[in-house]
Image: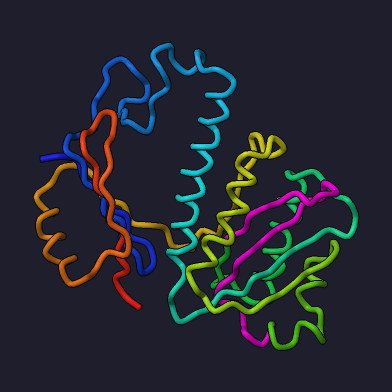
Amino acid sequence: MGYHKIIIYGNYLEFYEYERDIVILGGRNRSRYSDSEDLGSGGKNSLSGQEKLGKRQDNARRASMAFRRVVASNLGGSTRPLLITLTYGDNFTELKGAYKHFSSFIQSLRYKYGKTFKYVCVPEFQKRGAVHFHTLMWGLPFEIFLQERKTRTLARLWGRGFLYLKETDGDNKLSFYLSKYMAKAFLDPRLKNQKCYVASRNILRPIVWSGVAPVWPFLDDYLMDFTPIEDRIYDTKWMGKGRFRLFKTSN
């Protein structure tokens, strides 16, 4: 029986199946090693410049996919998020300081509206170099959206430039929208040793199960009621044939 992995987020379920289990390598700090983690026979330091670039791009793709799942975990419910874009009036370029400003903005929101809302936020650098934040927020009073143009309440709480507020339909496309900026941030050298995104503690996270267990046949029986929206078989270097299926489990 091979290795399996299930990832559940929002209305989606990803099901991975492999012919063989993950190879366990002794004497390495990183004990689990799969086809997607091949660093070459000479190790990490032996990679050429082009290979290192390819590795960074691959890591960015994986990080973007993981982030997209986080966003999608919070979509599809009865509460539709607001899309809030925060921009500096001056050319503020220091991300660490910008994160402190964003944290102060969140504290002001909590003081005014309570602590039940949740958010996920991705930074971006504008062409002029200034930091720019793309934020999804759930649970703020909807009256904010209706009145912001007149009252500028959120803009005053931000207090460092401009704030753009947009109502969303809560569709899963929002996860792709934000993950595009997250992948861009991941590759930006200005974000070295900085977070590529921040989220509130009450944000929902994907549920992940993995390993070799007798639960998989029962899961197959459950998934028979659904038609996969993606189903593909591929070869892997270390784990034999792989199969990926993506299901949408509710409307």
Q: Nearer the viewer, residue 219 or 207?
A: 219
- Residue 5 makes an appearance in the image: no
Residue 22, position as x, y percentages in the image:
24, 32
Residue 217, position as x, y percentages in the image:
10, 56
Q: Residue at x 76, y 50 (%)?
A: 98
Residue 88's place in the image compared with 75, above or below, is above
Asked whether 124 falls inside the magenta stretch, the response is yes
Residue 39's place in the image compared with 118, above or below, is above
The quarter of the picture where residue 96 lies is top right
User: Is 180 placed left or right of 6 in the picture?
Assistant: right
Q: Residue at x 49, y 61 (%)?
A: 71
Residue 120, position as x, y percentages in the image:
57, 60
Which contiguous range is marked in magenta? 120-144
Residue 112's place in the image compared with 36, above or below, is below
Q: Residue at x 46, y 67 (%)?
A: 74
Residue 73, position as x, y percentages in the image:
42, 64
User: Is 94 placed left or right of 41 in the picture?
Assistant: right
